[in-house]
Amino acid sequence: MTSTALLDLSGVAKSFGDKVVLAPTDLSIVEGSFVSVVGPSGCGKSTLFNIIAGLLAPDGGAVTLQGRDVVGATGHVGYMLQKDLLVPWRSVEDNITMAARLTRKVTSADRAEARQIAQRYGLGEFLDHYPKALSGGMRQRVAFMRTLVTHQQLLLLDEPFGALDAQTRLEMQRWLLDVWRESGRTVLFITHDVDESIFLSDRILVMSPRPGRIVADLDNPLARPRNIDILTDATFVALKSQIMHLLHGGER
Amino acid sequence: MRKGVIGKVLTPLASIVLLLLVWEAIVVVFNVQSYVVPRPLVAIQAVTDNWGTLWPLVLEIIRETIFGFLGGALIGIFFGVIMSKVRFFQRIIYPQLILSQAVPVVAVAFPLTVIFGFGSVKPIILIVIWIVFFPVTVNVLDGLGHVDQDLLNLAKVYGASRWRTFWQIEVPASVTPLFSGLKIGATYAITGAFIGELISPPLVSTNLAIYVEQANSHFDPASVYGVTLLMAFIGVAWFLIVSGAGVLATPWERRTVVRRWRRRIATPEGDR
C-alpha cells in the first residue's frame, strides 16, 4: 500500500457459539477509497460492519481507525442501513442533524449545514417536511445526508439502496458517486448486487459463508468518472464474470 | 375541511342522538312505566330542574376525576419507564401491578376509608389512580419495548448516551402508545371517582354518588338515569380532551409539514 491506511483490521474474528460467523480477517482500507463487500447472506459482512462500527466486540484481533484502537468503541463512523431509520417525529432538517442531537446540543451551525446540504442535493424545499411525505429515494438521500454531517471519515453503508426500485437505485448510485467525490470520504459499501459493486467501487471484497471470510480482494480498473455505458464495457463484464464465479463457484 | 367536520363531529353526535331515540322508542313501544325506566327527556329534565343542587357535586366529581387521572397517568408512566429500563424491577413489580388489578376495586376502597378517615377525599383520588395507572403502565412498557432496535443501534454507533437516546428516540417513539393507555384510563376515571364517592362520602354534606343512591332509594329513576347520563357525558368529554392532547402531541401523524410555530427561528439565508 502506497497511501496511508485509514482502517486496519488484523485477525478480527467472531463466533456465536460453535458457529464461526467471521474467520480471522485482515483488511486494510485506504483513505478516500470506495470499497464494496459482496457476498451471500451469512457470509459475515454485516458482522464485519458491526465490529467496525463498535456494535459487536470481536472475539480477537485489532481494529485500528486513523491509528487509534477502536475495538468496542462507538462514535467513530458514519453508518447507514437499507432501512432509512428516519424518525417520523422530526422534520427532514432535524433528521439530518440527528447525530448531533444524540451526542450534544445542536448548534445553529449544524442547522445551517443541514440546510445547505439539503439545498445542494435537491431537497431544500422539503426541509420542513416530515419524512412520511417523502418518497423512498428521497428518504434514503436524507439518511445519507444525516450520515455525511457526522463528519466521520469512514462511512459504512449496508445495502443502502437494497429496498429501492431499479430506476431509483441507478439514480441513487450516480448521486452517491458524485457526493463521494465531492466529500472525499472513505466508503465501505455492502451489497449483494454485483453490478452495483463494480459500478461504484475501486476495490471489491468477495465474501463467502461457512465460515464467513474474504475469499477475494479485487481491484477495479475501470476509470472514473463512470457513467452507465461502463455497464456493458468488456472490463466490466469480465470482472462481473469473475465475481459471479467466486460467488457461485460449483453451481453451474 | 367542511366535509371532514361533518364526518368527524356530526356523525358521532348523530349516533348518540339515535341511541337516545331508541331508548325513547323502547319505553314508548313496550309501555315501560316511568318508575322503572324514564324517558330520556324526563331523565335530562330531572338534572336541569335540580341543577342548583347538582352543579357543586358535579364540579367535585370532575375535580376528583381529573386529579385522579393525572396522578394515575404520572404513576403509570413512572412504573412503565422504570420497568422497561430495569429488567429486575419488571420481575418484581409487574406481578404486583397485575395483582392490584385483579383485586376488586370496591374491596380496596373500604380499608382506604379506614386508613384515611371517613369523609376524606383521598380514598376517592386513590381509587381513580388505582384504575387509571394500569393501562398507562402497560402501554408505556409496550411502547418503550418496541422501539426499532436498528434505530437504537444507529444511536449507539453515533456514540449517543443512554440518556439522550432515551429522550430523543425512546420517548417520542412511545408517545402514541402512551396516549392509547391514557385514553383507556380517561374512560375509567369517572367510574373510579363514582365508586370512590359511594364508599367514602363526606361526613356532613353529600356527593354525586350519594345523590344517585338516595334518588334510587326514593324511587326517582329519572334522577338516577339523568345523573348517570351526565357522568357518561363527563367521561366522554374527558376522553375527547385527552384524545385531543394526543393529536396535538403527535403532529407528524397527520401533517406533512412542520407547523411554523414549531420551527426554529431560521438564520438568514445565504449564510454559507
Image (spheres, coloured by chain):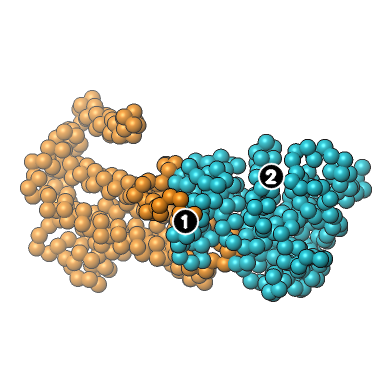
Residue marked by disc 1: A111
* Residue B259 relative to residue A245: left or right: left
Q: Quarter of the image for the C terminus of chain A: give it.
A: top right
Which quarter of the figure has residue A136?
top right
Shade representing chain B:
orange
Q: Quarter of the image for the N terminus of chain A: give it.
A: bottom right
Residue at 62% x, 63% y: name it. A152
Shade representing chain A:
cyan
Residue A25 drawn above or below residue A247: below
Residues at marks 1 and 2, common chain? yes
* Residue A201 relative to residue B97: left or right: right
Residue marked by disc 2: A173
Residue A235 drawn above or below residue B171: above
In the rendering, at what x and y percent does residue A189 appear?
72, 54
Residue at 20% x, 36% y: name it. B37
Q: Observer-nearest residue: A22 or A207?
A: A207
